[in-house]
Amino acid sequence: MAKINNGIMPSLIVLVLISCSIVGVRAASYTVGDSSGWSLGGSYGSWASDKTFAVSDTLVFNYAPGHTVDEVSANDYKTCSASNSISTDSSGATSITLKTAGTHYFICSVPGHCGGGMKLSVNVAAGGTSSSTSPPSTTGSTPSTTVSPPSVTGGSGSTFPSSASTISPAWVLFFTICGMVVLKSFL
């Protein structure tokens, strides 16, 4: 293999750094209810009020047996109905990656739990722009976004930090290319 010309090396590194800084938006992971988790008596509107959510962020619901996490429409959120759930899980550790912009609605489908406060509405901004949560629309319309079913991770005994974050694929690419450049310079 041929060595990379010393004049090209700095240009290549600058190009990689610029590319990664443009693409390098990190997804965040939010533990719903923080250390209290998903349970009766939580104030999820208050919990979400100081957070911004973007596409690719993950909501982590940790809860005891006897609860569920159901993603529902705006109307079902208002009426605490899970009869037409978009997705449902009762594993005790549900992770949902927010894949689309718009308002997403979550409830516990156990009778009386949603009415007792186990409901969460989050407004998800596209592409890492700031946003805040808002109450459900009063027009009665459902969100026009397509929602994917949750991906479940963890299990009983698993713990999740409340503000964990993941590494952006751009950083993985950056370090891979840097490693290749360094390796190639020794050849």
Image (cartoon, rainbow, N blue to C red):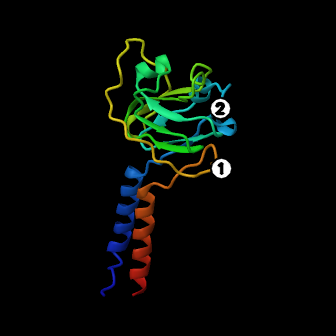
Closer to the camera in the image, 82 or 22: 82
The local crowd at label 2, few if under 14, some if 14 to 19, many if 20 or more residues have their Cα within 10 Å, is many
Quadrant location of residue 182? Answer: bottom left
Closer to the camera in the image, 20 or 6: 20
Locate the N terminus by quadrant: bottom left
Q: Name the element at disc 2.
A: loop
Closer to the camera in the image, 164 or 118: 118
Nearer to us of marks 2 and 1 is 2
In percent of width and height, residue 33 lies at: 63, 34
Tell me the CA gap for discs 2 and 1: 15 Å
Task: Give the residue type at disc 1.
Answer: Thr
Closer to the camera in the image, 9 or 104: 104
Q: Work out whether mark 2 precedes mark 1 in sequence or the reverse, and give the earlier one.
A: 2
How many numbered discs?
A: 2
In percent of width and height, residue 158 lies at: 64, 52
Residue holding disc 2: 39
Classify 125 as above or below 80: below
| Residue occupying image coordinates x 50% and y 48% | 152
Classify 116 as above or below 24: above
Quadrant location of residue 86? Answer: top left
Residue holding disc 1: 159
| Residue occupying image coordinates x 48% and y 46% | 27
The local crowd at label 1, few if under 14, some if 14 to 19, many if 20 or more residues have their Cα within 10 Å, is few
In percent of width and height, residue 82 lies at: 46, 27
In percent of width and height, residue 20 lies at: 40, 56
Classify 89 as above or below 134: below
| Residue occupying image coordinates x 38% and y 50% | 22
Q: Are marks 2 and 1 in contact (CB under 8 Å)?
A: no
Q: Name the element at disc 1.
A: loop
- Left or right: residue 80 versus residue 11 is right
Classify 82 as above or below 169: above
